[in-house]
Amino acid sequence: MTLADEPGHLIRRAQQIAVAVFHDVHGRHVTPIQYAILRTLHEAPGIDQVTLANLVALDTSTAADIAARLEAKGWIVRHVLPRRQRSLALTPEGETVLDALRPGVQAMQATLMGSMEPAEQAEFLRLLRKFVHFQG
């Protein structure tokens, strides 16, 4: 088996490619994980940081650090809950940032999936979901 046949190597390369395409499309003012957090908070406003961390597959301290940075940018607001938890929600500015990212995300997906036929794209996504959920 060559390196190019090893799943771990291919997954790492796929991640590198996805991040590079994300930055080519969006620049560096927002990261892929920041986008994931903004998107998740749009879909589930008011969730706590622990739930957010689970939904975007981060450890809680990393999620808290990123949330603090997004709050400093004015893109989210955090409210203290009982037991030192925090609920999170997008600000109007955060919604604007997310709305501005959406067309680029669609273009990015077209770039990443463009070498595959529609049936292959669907199968690739099905297999990725299976892999991720099996691992999680």
Image (spheres, helix red, strand yellow):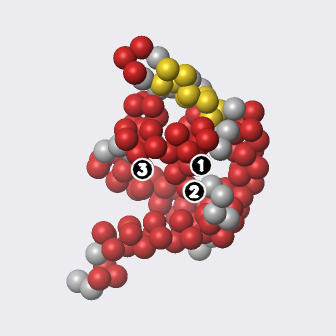
In this rendered view, identify the residue nearer to me: 15 or 133. Answer: 15
Q: Amino acid at mark 2?
A: Thr
Q: Earlier in the sequence, mark 3 or mark 1?
A: 1
Res 79 quadrant in image: top right
Residues at marks 3 and 1 touching, judged by CB atoms closer than 8 Å: no
**In the picture, residue 61 is in which quadrant?**
top left
What label sits on residue 35 in the rendered view? 1
Residue drawn 56% across the image and 70% down it:
20
In the rendering, which numbered label is found on residue 31? 2
Name the kind of residue labelled 3 in the image: Arg
Q: In the figure, is residue 102 to the left or right of 12?
A: right
Check disc 1 and give the amino acid type.
Tyr
Could you tell me how far apart the alpha carbons at marks 1 and 2 are, in whole angstroms? Answer: 6 Å
Q: Residue at 41%, 45% (x, y): give it.
A: 62
In percent of the image, x 48 and y 25: which residue is there? 86
**Horizontal and vertical percent for residue 53?**
42, 38
Q: Quadrant of residue 63?
A: top left
State whether residue 82 is above or below residue 46.
Answer: above
- Quadrant location of the N terminus in the rendered image: bottom left
**C-alpha separation, residue under disc 3 versus residue under disc 2:** 22 Å
From this viewpoint, which residue is outermost toward the top? Answer: 82
Residue 38 in sight: no
Say few, some or many: other residues with alpha carbon within 10 Å of mark 3 (under 14 / 14 to 19 / 20 or more): few
Q: Are marks 1 and 2 in contact (CB under 8 Å)?
A: yes
Q: Is residue 31 left or right of residue 64?
A: right
In this rendering, the label closer to the viewer, 3 or 2: 2
Identify the secondary structure beneath mark 3: helix
Q: Position of residue 72 (x, y in %)?
A: 61, 41
